[in-house]
Every structure is written in structure tokens, then in C-alpha cells.
């Protein structure tokens, strides 16, 4: 019989029809009979792959197992700090982050940030010298008596009874005279200016330079300082309405005002500490204590400005203003320029320079021959 006539009469046997259905169902991720609770079986979107590749087949099997476990509620969630199964390490990259794993990842990131910040904090503290807090505390204890000249006659005391504007001008004039001059001498010169009505910029401008110089004498370099004071008074009148400059740069623009004076005026007059005031006492004592070094070396600083920069790198900012009168008074009473009184110093066990400088006030005596 012709083949075309036989085709309509062909019937599929029940076994063949079952085989066809099973082949069609091969695309199912999970059969409904695996979990009687599941009422709806979802079909996977058609995926083309080459079954000749063993890795592709293994990947599909893993996906099926994973899907079956999720539907059966048997898929356990990983917890942070729990060691995963060895298979989890193998396939971790192929998995997508669930909500819980995303939360875990974010918590890990936060923990890393905390660790990094703590490391940075430790690195910042490395520049501070050893035992600096104990040394500073010891100096503060020794300075409680307030017997140093700076405590009663320093620039901070200039014009203390005057109104704010007039007091600021008195602080500026006192600071300009204080360079290479003892506090007692500077304080006496301020008193003479006050007695003659010359703690006022307008009055100073109208006074001749010679008279001004004689009034502040014996301040160091009194003639040159008289010239600088008169120039500064004129600038205060013309540019600041009789007040003093309120910025560091404008103070430094005045002749006769250096970094030490500018920082001191900003702290005392304007209550705006922008740097450490380093005079000869702060410079000397900081080097004796081993607190400061030249940039990139372990050698002592050679100028007050180098000392200021080195100190500001590690000294907490709330100590910047009090460190000047503290060390100045310490230098005036105990840690003196010549023959420091290490025997009376309460921190001689912490000071690297203790007892290393001669304490004998007598010059070298000539050797006498024995009879």
C-alpha cells in the first residue's frame, strides 16, 4: 500500500504517548510529585545548551537541586561567622546575593571601615613623643604656684582693665615690645605708656618717635620698636578704625610683628587660636624634652618657627593656647637657659636632657700647683 495512505491510520500506542510527554516534561525544574504541598509547577524558560559538554550538564543539575531544596524549604541560609561547606566555596561565584547575604555583605563593609579608621588613628598618634602626657602633667603641677613673671606681667595682662577694643591695642603694643625682652621690662614699658595716655593709636601717631622711644626704653631695640609701633598705630587708624587686624596674615603684614607675636595676639586679643606661640622658652624646652625635630630628621629644631610646625603636628589643639605661658613660666623658674635646676624638677626622670648641662655657676678656675 502507498505510504501516503498508511499515515492517517497510524496511531500512537499509550507507551509512545507517555514517552513523548516525559520528553516534554524534561524541561521542568521540579516535578509536582516531589513535594505534595506544591500545587503549581513553573516551567523554565527554554535554554539552549550543548549536552555534550559535561560542565553544562553539571550546571543544570546543580540548578535543579537548588530549586528543589528551595521549594521544599530545606535550603539553609548562611550566617556570618559560620564555616560553609566545601561545596559552597566551589560554586560561590555563580550564586546571586539574597537579601540576607546582602545584609551580611554590608555589615562586613562597615566592619572594614571601622578597622581602617582605627588604623589611621593609630598612625596619626605615632608622631607624638613617648610619655608626653605625663611630662605635660608634671609641668602643670610645678606651675600651680603661679610665681613666674609671666603669670603677673606677661602680654596677657596688658590693658586687662580697659574696654575690649582698647585692650586689644594694648596687647598688640605689648607683644611688639616683648621680643628679646623680659616680661618685667615689657610690663613696665606698657605702664609708662598708659600713664602718658599713649595706649591709644591716635595719641601714638601724634607723638614724635624720639619721645616714644624714651618712654619704652630699656626694651630691647627700643628705637626700632618705637618706629614699628608708630607705623602700626597709623595702619590701625586708617584701615581698621582704631582697632587691630583680626587675621593672622594682616597682623604679619605689620612691620615688627613675626609669627610668634601674631599667634599670641590672635589668641589673647581675638580668642582665636590658629597656631602655637613659640618664643625662646618654648623653643628651648621643647628641644630639651625631645618633643620636636626638623622635618624628615631626628635632629633638633634650630628656629622657633621649625619648633612651632613640629609641635603642631602632634600636640592636641586644645593645648595650643596654654602651652606658651606654661612653658614660659617653667623656663623662667626651673628649666632656665643656663644652669637649669634639674634637682628641683619633678620630671627629671622623664626628661632626656636632665642633668646633662652644667649646673655650676662658677667659671672654670685655674689649676693651682701643689707645693
Image (tube, helix red, strand yellow):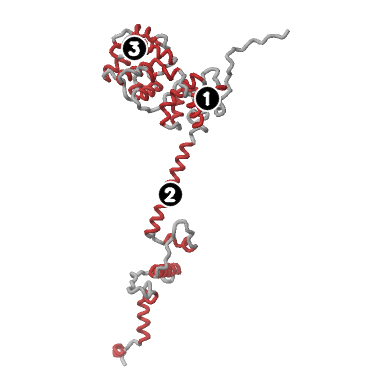
356 is higher (above) or lower (below) than 55? above
Give the mark nearer the N terminus: 3 vs 2: 2
For the point 72% across and 9% down, the residue is 370
Q: Nearer the viewer, mark 1 or mark 3?
A: 3
Q: Position of residue 253 (x, y in %)?
A: 34, 20
Query: Disc 2 marks which residue?
Result: 111
Q: Is residue 60 in sight in this rendering?
A: no
Circle 1 Cα neighbour tier, 10 Å, few/some/many (<14 / 14–19 / ≥20): some
Query: Is 54 situated left or right of 243 in this image?
Result: right
What is the CA distance from the residue labelled 3 to the residue labelled 2? 63 Å
Circle 3 Cα neighbour tier, 10 Å, few/some/many (<14 / 14–19 / ≥20): some
Q: On residue 288, which mark appears? A: 1
**The quarter of the displayed image where residue 55 is located:** bottom left
Q: Secondary structure at mark 2?
A: helix
Q: Secondary structure at mark 3?
A: helix
What is the CA distance from the residue labelled 1 to the residue labelled 3? 38 Å
Quadrant into which the N terminus falls: bottom left
For the point 51% across and 19% down, the residue is 336
Q: Secondary structure at mark 1?
A: helix
Give the mark nearer the N terminus: 1 vs 3: 3
93 is higher (above) or lower (below) than 29? above
**The quarter of the displayed image where residue 199 is located:** top left
Query: Is 263 situated left or right of 355 in this image?
Result: left
Q: Is residue 194 in sight in this rendering?
A: yes
For the point 35% across and 73% down, the residue is 38
Q: Nearer the viewer, mark 3 or mark 2?
A: 3
Residue at the farthest front position:
145
Q: Position of residue 117 (x, y in %)?
A: 43, 43
Query: Disc 3 marks which residue?
Result: 194
Quadrant into which the C terminus falls: top right
Residue at the farthest bottom position:
1
Amino acid at each position: 500500500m502507498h505510504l501516503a495512505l498508511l499515515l492517517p491510520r497510524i496511531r500512537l500506542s499509550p507507551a509512545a504517548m507517555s514517552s513523548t510527554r516525559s520528553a516534554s516534561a524534561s524541561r521542568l525544574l521540579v516535578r509536582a510529585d516531589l513535594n505534595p504541598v506544591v500545587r503549581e509547577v513553573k516551567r523554565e524558560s527554554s535554554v539552549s545548551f550543548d549536552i555534550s559538554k559535561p560542565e553544562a550538564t553539571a550546571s543544570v543539575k546543580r540548578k535543579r537541586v537548588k530549586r528543589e531544596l528551595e521549594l521544599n524549604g530545606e535550603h539553609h541560609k548562611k550566617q556570618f561567622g559560620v564555616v560553609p561547606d566545601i561545596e559552597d566555596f566551589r560554586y560561590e561565584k555563580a550564586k546571586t546575593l539574597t537579601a540576607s547575604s546582602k545584609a551580611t555583605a554590608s555589615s562586613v563593609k562597615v566592619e572594614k571601615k571601622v578597622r581602617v579608621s582605627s588604623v589611621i588613628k593609630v598612625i596619626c598618634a605615632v608622631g607624638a613623643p613617648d610619655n608626653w602626657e605625663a611630662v605635660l602633667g608634671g609641668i602643670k603641677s610645678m606651675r600651680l604656684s603661679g610665681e613666674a613673671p609671666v603669670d603677673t606681667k606677661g602680654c596677657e595682662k596688658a590693658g586687662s582693665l580697659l574696654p575690649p577694643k582698647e585692650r586689644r591695642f594694648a596687647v598688640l603694643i605689648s607683644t611688639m615690645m616683648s621680643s628679646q625682652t623680659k616680661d618685667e621690662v615689657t610690663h613696665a614699658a606698657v605702664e609708662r605708656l598708659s600713664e602718658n595716655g599713649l595706649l591709644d593709636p591716635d595719641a601714638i601717631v601724634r607723638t614724635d618717635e624720639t619721645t616714644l622711644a624714651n618712654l619704652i626704653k630699656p626694651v630691647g631695640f627700643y628705637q626700632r620698636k618705637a618706629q614699628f609701633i608708630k607705623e602700626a598705630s597709623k595702619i590701625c587708624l586708617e584701615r581698621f578704625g582704631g582697632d587691630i587686624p583680626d587675621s593672622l596674615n594682616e597682623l604679619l603684614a605689620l612691620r615688627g610683628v613675626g609669627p610668634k607675636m601674631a599667634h599670641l595676639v590672635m589668641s589673647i586679643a581675638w580668642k582665636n587660636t590658629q597656631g602655637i606661640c613659640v618664643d625662646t622658652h618654648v623653643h628651648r624646652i621643647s628641644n630639651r624634652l625631645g618633643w620636636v625635630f626638623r622635618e624628615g630628621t631626628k635632629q633638633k629644631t634650630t628656629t622657633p618657627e621649625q619648633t612651632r610646625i613640629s609641635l603642631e603636628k602632634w600636640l592636641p589643639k586644645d593645648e595650643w593656647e596654654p602651652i606658651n605661658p606654661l612653658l614660659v613660666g617653667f623656663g623662667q623658674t626651673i628649666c632656665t637657659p643656663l644652669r637649669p635646676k634639674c634637682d628641683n624638677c619633678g620630671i627629671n626622670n622623664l626628661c632626656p636632657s636632665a642633668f646633662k648641662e652644667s649646673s655650676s655657676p662658677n667659671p672654670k678656675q685655674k689649676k693651682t700647683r701643689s707645693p
